[in-house]
Image (spheres, grey):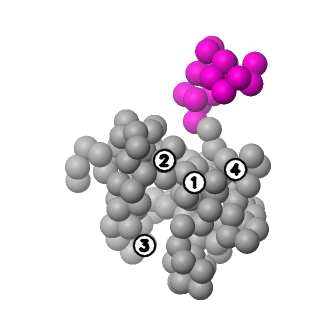
Amino acid sequence: MSDAASAILAVVERVPRGKVTTYGAVAERAGWPRRARLVGRVLAGLPPGSRIPWHRVVASGGRIAFPAGSDAREEQLRRLRREGVVAVQGRVDLRVHGWTSPESDLDRLLWDVGGEN
């Protein structure tokens, strides 16, 4: 497994139950900024039955990336619902269900990243 794939999977494994993050955020946290498609390729290559919580990763804006009506989309929505994550019209509200890692919370507190303080 490549260093990039290992880093990406390590980030995805940390996404807590009931939360989601985006492909771009995973890439950033894994040290591969602007490589959201790489995250998608790594997750698409997971073997069946993998315990990696791939379903907690969504496209920008909280959008479910799989095509409407596809088995993958239905599986992702089913898994998210089981964790209490609601998707309305194929979109998860990141303000409610979005995950921020402890590192990004610390940055926000120390440096006022995002202008929240």
Q: Position of residue 33 (x, y in %)?
A: 40, 39
Few, some or many C-alpha atoms within 10 Å of disc 1 (few <14, some 14-19, many ≥20)? Answer: some
- What whole-number distance in Å separates the C-alpha atoms at marks 1 and 2? 7 Å
| Total number of numbered discs in the rendering | 4
Q: Nearer the viewer, residue 65 or 83?
A: 65
Residue 58's image quarter? Answer: bottom right
Judge whether 89 appears above or below 41 on screen.
Answer: below
| Mark 1–mark 2 CB contact (< 8 Å) | yes
Tell me where the magenta segment starts and ends, as one range: 101-117
Few, some or many C-alpha atoms within 10 Å of disc 3 (few <14, some 14-19, many ≥20)? Answer: few
| Mark 2–mark 3 CB contact (< 8 Å) | no
Q: Which residue is mark 1?
A: 60
Residue 24 shows which numbered tag?
A: 2
Judge whether 49 appears above or below 19 on screen.
Answer: below
Mark 3 vs 4, N-terminal side: 3
Q: Nearer the viewer, residue 10 or 27?
A: 27
- What whole-number distance in Å separates the C-alpha atoms at marks 3 and 1? 26 Å
Q: Which residue is mark 4?
A: 94
Left/right of residue 108 with respect to residue 86 in the rendered view: left
Q: Position of residue 64 (x, y in %)?
A: 59, 66
Few, some or many C-alpha atoms within 10 Å of disc 2 (few <14, some 14-19, many ≥20)? Answer: many
Amino acid at the residue labelled 2: Gly
Q: Which residue is mark 3?
A: 49
- What whole-number distance in Å separates the C-alpha atoms at marks 2 and 3? 24 Å
Mark 3 vs 1, N-terminal side: 3
Left/right of residue 21 with respect to residue 91 in the rendered view: left
- What whole-number distance in Å separates the C-alpha atoms at marks 3 and 4? 27 Å
| Mark 4–mark 2 CB contact (< 8 Å) | no
Which residue is at the far top? 110
Question: For the residues carrying marks 3 and 4, which lies nearer the camera in this image?
Answer: 4
Amino acid at the residue labelled 4: Leu
- What whole-number distance in Å separates the C-alpha atoms at marks 4 and 2? 13 Å
